[in-house]
Image (cartoon, rainbow, N blue to C red):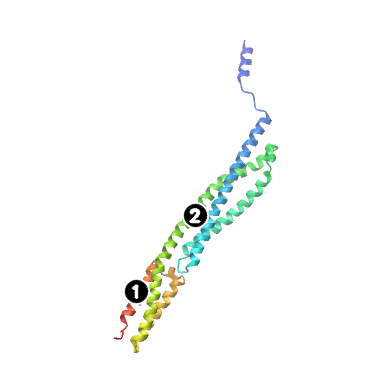
Amino acid sequence: MWGRKRREQHSEQPPEETYEEMLAEGRVAFADLMRMADETHEMAGRSFGTLDEMRRETEELLSGDPALPTAAARAQFAEHERLWESLLADMKAYEARRGRWADEKDIENADFDAMSADHEYFRDYVRSRASVLQRMNKLIGELGTLAVSLTVLREQLAPIRERSHAALEAAATEIAWAGLTGQSAYALQARLNAAGDRLRELDAGDGESGLPRSIPDQYRDVEREIAEIRDSVARPAF
């Protein structure tokens, strides 16, 4: 009786997996892990491509107008370069490791020892990409915000700068035609020269030295100074 019961209990237990069955399951799991690693690797590459394109667009904006501020862009470009150096090293290492399994038959014929050697690497690679993607997405967002800000600033500067240069030229003409002499003439000319120098400095990108006062406001300061000089010029009566 007891013997029969024990045999019945034993027959109800699932059969133990054979080594070949466990090996087959291990190969499937390893192949799935590598597919996940490949997808993560490609995603990181695409994200960096987007980041790289945004940097080029920002550089084009800055090169198109020297008056635009560059400090924020330089800081983000430096982060872009650090990220690229790190990502490039990781990508080269990944591709070298992945090359060992380039042929699907390599996995189909792999044993546990061969898979175990790289399983931890691919697992850690997938996990580590999360922080890398987060850094890239943050930088993409910052560059996008910067590009919008630079575009808006460029549009703001265009009319102010045009007015300032026109006023500078008009003031020089008015001083010349007014026929002023003595100290008043020298003083007005000196003020106008200083305003012209500051205007050219702003055009060349020196606006950041005047921060936190905004660059448009610095242009307006010059425009206001030129207006005051013109008001001081005694215009001849015609």
Write the residue at 55% across / 55% down: 83
Dot 2: element: helix
Q: Is residue 149 above or below residue 105?
A: below
Amino acid under label 2? Answer: Ile
Write the residue at 31% across / 81% down: 232
Residue 44 percent across, percent down from the top left = 56, 50
Looking at this view, is 124 or 231 the one in front? 231
Residue 75 percent across, percent down from the top left = 49, 61
Q: Is residue 220 above or below residue 16?
A: below
Crowdedness of circle 1 by 10 Å Cα count: few (<14), some, many (20+)?
A: some
Corner quadrant of residue 210 = bottom left
Write the residue at 63% across / 18% down: 11
Q: Is residue 220 above or below residue 28?
A: below
For the image, the number of numbered tags is 2
Q: Which mark is residue 224?
A: 1
Ranked by sequence position, the earlier of labels 1 and 2 is 2
Q: Quadrant of the C terminus?
A: bottom left
Residue 49 percent across, percent down from the top left = 55, 54
Location of mark 2 (residue):
140
Residue 182 percent across, percent down from the top left = 34, 89
Q: Is residue 43 above or below residue 214?
A: above
> Does residue 46 appear anywhere in the picture?
yes
Instruction: Name the residue at the top extreme.
Output: 1
Write the residue at 53% across / 60% down: 56
Looking at this view, is 59 or 142 the one in front? 59
